[in-house]
């Protein structure tokens, strides 16, 4: 996918700001998107960090705060789809407070699959990475990647192992 200028990306400025301000990852290890390289999360380092991974949620489609019960149902449906594909996701979450969203960190996923899952649950974007190089991948109305902004996945200070365990939900 070609990187397009920010002015050409199909997203709302407030939604972009929210994606860039939040933290992502597991309960034990959080990261932010950064323009500067820094210490990567453990799953994005060494031999583990050579492959692709993504963070996908089914919560709050289109950036609209949704009832907890509906979010929980959507999250369970996303988990079932990911597990049915043969991948083993790790429980994760995006953000904190009122906008905290349960998510899946999915090692080994291809971009098209991560985008398809995000689109199936009404998401405006997904995070997809290879190693520590991460992209905020915007989705169009048909669920296809429509643009990407490249960043580094930089671990938050004070977070770190233990490594996440596969999701058992």
Image (spheres, grey):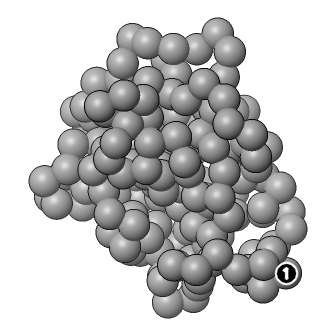
The image shows residue 7, relative to residue 111, as above or below, that is below
Quarter of the picture containing the C terminus is top left
Counting every numbered tag in the picture gives: 1
Q: Residue at x 68, y 44 (%)?
A: 33
Q: Which residue is nearer to you in this view: 64 or 21?
A: 21
Q: Residue at x 36, y 51 (%)?
A: 52
Please provide percent x and percent y for residue 113: 33, 69
- Determine the image quadrant of residue 31: top right
Instruction: Report whether residue 44 is seen.
Output: yes
Please provide percent x and percent y for residue 12: 81, 73
Q: Which residue is nearer to you in this view: 124 or 153?
A: 153
Is 152 on the left-hand or right-hand side of 117? right
Please provide percent x and percent y for residue 37: 68, 36
Is 118 on the left-hand or right-hand side of 5? left
Is 47 on the left-hand or right-hand side of 74? left
Instruction: Report whether residue 102 is seen.
Output: no
Q: Residue at x 64, y 75 (%)?
A: 3
Please provide percent x and percent y for residue 108: 27, 50
Q: Which residue is mark 1?
A: 7
Most extreme residue toward the bottom, as rendered? 142
- Determine the image quadrant of residue 48: top left
Q: Would you call the spot at circle 1 few (<14 residues within 10 Å), some (14-19), or many (20 or more)? A: few
Is 135 on the left-hand or right-hand side of 164? right
Q: Which residue is nearer to you in this view: 11 or 76?
A: 11
Q: Which residue is nearer to you in this view: 30 or 59?
A: 30
Q: Residue at x 68, y 64 (%)?
A: 149
Element assignment for label 1? helix
The image shows residue 63, relative to residue 47, as above or below, that is below
């Amino acid at each position: 996918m070609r990187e397009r200028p920010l002015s050409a990306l199909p997203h709302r400025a407030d939604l972009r700001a929210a994606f860039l301000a939040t933290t992502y990852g597991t309960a034990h290890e959080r990261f932010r998107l950064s323009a500067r390289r820094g210490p990567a999360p453990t799953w994005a380092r060494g031999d583990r960090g050579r492959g692709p991974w993504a963070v996908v949620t089914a919560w709050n489609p289109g950036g609209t705060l949704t009832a907890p019960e509906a979010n929980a149902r959507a999250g369970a449906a996303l988990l079932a789809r990911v597990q049915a594909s043969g991948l083993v996701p790790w429980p994760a979450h995006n953000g904190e407070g009122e906008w905290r969203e349960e998510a899946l960190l999915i090692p080994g996923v291809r971009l098209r699959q991560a985008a398809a899952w995000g689109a199936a649950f009404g998401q405006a974007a997904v995070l997809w990475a290879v190693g520590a190089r991460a992209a905020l991948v915007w989705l169009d109305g048909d669920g296809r990647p429509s643009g990407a902004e490249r960043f580094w996945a930089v671990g938050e200070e004070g977070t770190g192992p233990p490594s996440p365990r596969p999701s058992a939900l």
